Amino acid sequence: MRAVRPVEELRREALAASPPPQPDSLLAPDLVDLTTLDPAIRLEIRYATTNNFMGAALYTSARAFMQRPAAEALRRALERLRPYGYGLLIHDAYRPWYVTRMFWDATPDSQRTFVANPARGSRHNRGCAVDLSLYDLATGAPVRMPSGYDEFSPRAYVAYVGGTALQRWQRELLRWAMEAEGFVVNSTEWWHFDFRDWARYPVLNLRFEDLARL
């Protein structure tokens, strides 16, 4: 899939827009850089490159942040995977709201089930969702899953029975480790996990250059 409108036009409109209003009762943000948690957490931030479904770099830097309780749960999930010889490969975590708005405006109506509605904001916007896969600690090579990351097809569903037995086992191993630490998988995206307390945090629109100054 490619954007139905020019990306720079979408970016200008999204940056000029405002996120949905937030109740005052939500927790204050406490975003943690995931690379500070453990060297076995590696980044491959697709939205900082052109290798994504939009075909354009949407982030100004390849960084990954989550709210502190979610980040600590992610580190514990890694500890469950380490004995099997796997590390975590992060494709996306905190996502500024304006990028979610860009995704929505760029996506054809027929495929909007795969993107979050900016009127509500996404769990990525709250710093409580992560897109990730596994890599082999011995070789550094990413594992092969039944589908590619951000593939808009039934192969991305967690119930998909195709692919090889090894690919399905690796998908289920990732799910087991994440769900054991309080994450919930998205049924149509094997790589997407939401932290259980996401509703306690506000939708954020901090850009990555803003986070670098914190």
Image (cartoon, helix red, strand yellow):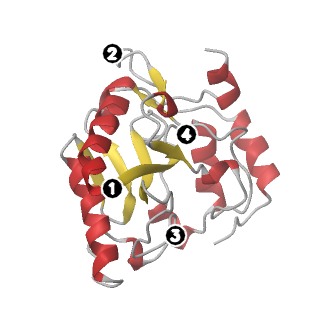
The residue under label 1 is 85
Mark in the foreground, 4 or 3: 4
Real-space CA distance between mark 2 and mark 4, rounded to the nearest whole angstrom: 22 Å
Real-space CA distance between mark 1 and mark 3, rounded to the nearest whole angstrom: 36 Å
- Amino acid type, mark 4: Arg
Q: Earlier in the sequence, mark 2 or mark 4?
A: 2
Residue found 73% across the figure and 34% down from its top: 16
Mark in the foreground, 1 or 2: 1
Q: Earlier in the sequence, mark 4 or mark 3?
A: 4
The residue under label 3 is 111
- Amino acid type, mark 3: Gln
Contact flag, marks 1 and 2 (Cβ < 8 Å):
no
The residue under label 2 is 25
Task: Measuring from the top left, give residue 146's x and y in whole percent.
Answer: 39, 76
- Dot 4 falls on a residue whose secondary structure is loop
- Amino acid type, mark 2: Ser
Q: Earlier in the sequence, mark 1 or mark 3?
A: 1
Q: Earlier in the sequence, mark 4 or mark 1?
A: 1
